Image (cartoon, helix red, strand yellow):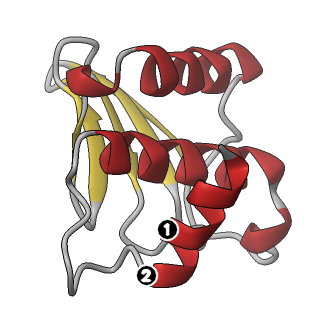
Amino acid sequence: MARPPKELVESILRSLKERPKDWEIDDYSATNHGAGVEVWIGNELYGMEITVGDRNGRKTYGGVIIGSILVAWRWRLYLAAMKARKANHWIEPGSTATASVVALLDAAQ
């Protein structure tokens, strides 16, 4: 799969930051139904995908690559999704959003 366009990543980051309530975020995905965007975060950085569109025309970016942990856009999207999830009080005890991620988000504020 292809790398997502920079403009797509930036618009998702802006939306997660400015309008976190537009997103449904669980242990596996961050979804904005109104915009037709889903970010797969179930494997954290490894295998992260961005899917844009509806059933009639979907485009997927990302996927499993060697060295996923070194790809900056993956880090930025994952942390932004976790920050939006925390802002919406969607991080619950026992979820895959570990204490280290929560601590990292708290330190970034």
Q: Amino acid at mark 2?
A: Thr
Q: Nearer the viewer, residue 64 or 94?
A: 94
Left or right: residue 13 compared with residue 42: right
Q: Which residue is mark 2?
A: 98
Under circle 1, the secondary element is helix
Rendered location of residue 3, percent (x, y): 71, 40
- What mark, if any, has residue 102 been given in the picture? 1
Taking depth in this image into account, of 42 and 16 the one nearest to the observer is 16
- Rendering quarter of residue 40: bottom left
Question: Which residue is at a point 52% across and 59% down the rendered structure image?
Answer: 48
Q: Position of residue 55 (x, y in %)?
A: 14, 26
The quadrant holding residue 64 is bottom right
Crowding at dot 1, Cα within 10 Å, few <14 / some 14-19 / many 20+, comes out as some
Residue at image coords 57%, 14%: 11
Is residue 17 shown above or below 80? above
Image location (x, y in percent) of residue 58: 32, 27
Is the Cβ of the residue at disc 2 closer than 8 Å to that at disc 1? Answer: yes
Give the class, few, some or many, for how many residues have Cα within 10 Å of label 2's Cα (few <14, many ≥20). Answer: few
* Amino acid type at mark 1: Val
What is the quadrant of the C terminus in the image?
Answer: top right
Residue at horizontal 23%, vertical 20%? 22
Q: Is residue 61 left or right of residue 39?
A: right
Tell me which residue sits at (63%, 27%) in the image.
9
Horizontally, is 86 left or right of 76 in the view?
left
Judging depth in this view, the residue of 96 and 36 nearest the camera is 96
- Mark 2 lies on a secondary structure that is loop
Specify the farthest residue to the bottom: 94
Residue 80 rendering spot, x and y as whole percentages = 54, 42
Q: CA distance from mark 2 to mark 1?
A: 7 Å
* Residue 19 disc label: none
